[in-house]
Image: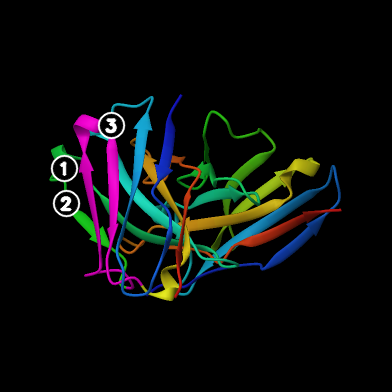
Amino acid sequence: EVQLVESGGDLVKPGGSLRVSCVASGFTFNNAWMSWVRQAPGKGLEWVGRIKRKNDGGTTDYAAPVKGRFTISRDDSKNTVYLQMNSLKTEDTAVYYCTLGAGTTDFDYWGQGTLVIVSS
Amino acid sequence: QTVVTQEPSLTVSPGGTVTLTCASSTGAVTSGNFPGWFQKRPGQAPRSLIYSTSNKYSWTPARFSGSLLGGSAALTLSGVQPEDEAEYYCLLYYGLPRVFGGGTKLAVL
């Protein structure tokens, strides 16, 4: 069974930084494309970005609102994907979900999410 | 950027049938947009239901089906159960960025 467990969500001040993590199990992690999706309070799902598996170049792509501020990385030895968030804004307040693409789509499996609150 | 539009809310009676749609600002949705559908219950993680228009995951209940309908992607629930009350999101692939629809809140009353 594939499981994704996010952690690291916290309350952070505007302009601050935070790194959230997602540990995967039940799948050959180095074969997976990993993505982050967020949901702000009362809003819908918003794609944040993704990282390809190393065999496909390991490259990253980001949504325009986070490009240049957020960085996605992966450590295949730890079955973990990270989302480093810098220069945080109040509008980044959301539950952040990691997703695992197992070969059909980018979003086959979802974690339970981690809450990031950006507030002074 | 493409805008993906869903009905904001729908209501269905238990045992009934309801169809949710997913339209694109760029024109007709095709199988080449690989429509996907996700279920989101309050306080729970989203769950993938349908990929590539009509393909189900092993955990997708048989009462859920996906199709193309009148230029939109569609998700049909037949024999609705109380536990189907949730928000449903579609996703259409237009390269990057990935674009979700605004979601349909389905009430089962």
Q: Earlier in the sequence, mark 3 or mark 2?
A: 3
Give the structural element (helix, strand or loop) at label 3.
helix
The amino acid type found where label 1 is placed reads: Asp
Q: Earlier in the sequence, mark 1 or mark 3?
A: 3
Give the structural element (helix, strand or loop) at label 1.
helix
> Left or right of B54: which side holds A17?
left
Tag 3–tag 2 contact (CB < 8 Å):
no
The amino acid type found where label 2 is placed reads: Thr
Q: Which mark, by number, is residue A29?
A: 3
Return the residue at label 2. Answer: A59
Tag 1–tag 2 contact (CB < 8 Å):
yes
**Closer to the camera in the image, B37 or A16:** A16
Q: Position of residue A100 (x, y in %)?
A: 37, 40
Q: Pick the quarter of the image with the C terminus of chain A.
A: bottom left
Question: Quick one: label 2, few (<14), some, or many (20+) residues within 10 Å?
Answer: some
- Magenta range is A65-88
Residue drawn at x 34%, y 27% as measured from the top left: A27
Q: Position of residue A18 (x, y in %)?
A: 32, 59
Q: Position of residue B10 (x, y in %)?
A: 75, 62
Query: Subunit of mark 3?
Result: A
Return the residue at label 1. Answer: A56
Give the structural element (helix, strand or loop) at label 2.
loop
* Inter-mark Cα distance, 1 to 3: 13 Å
The amino acid type found where label 3 is placed reads: Phe
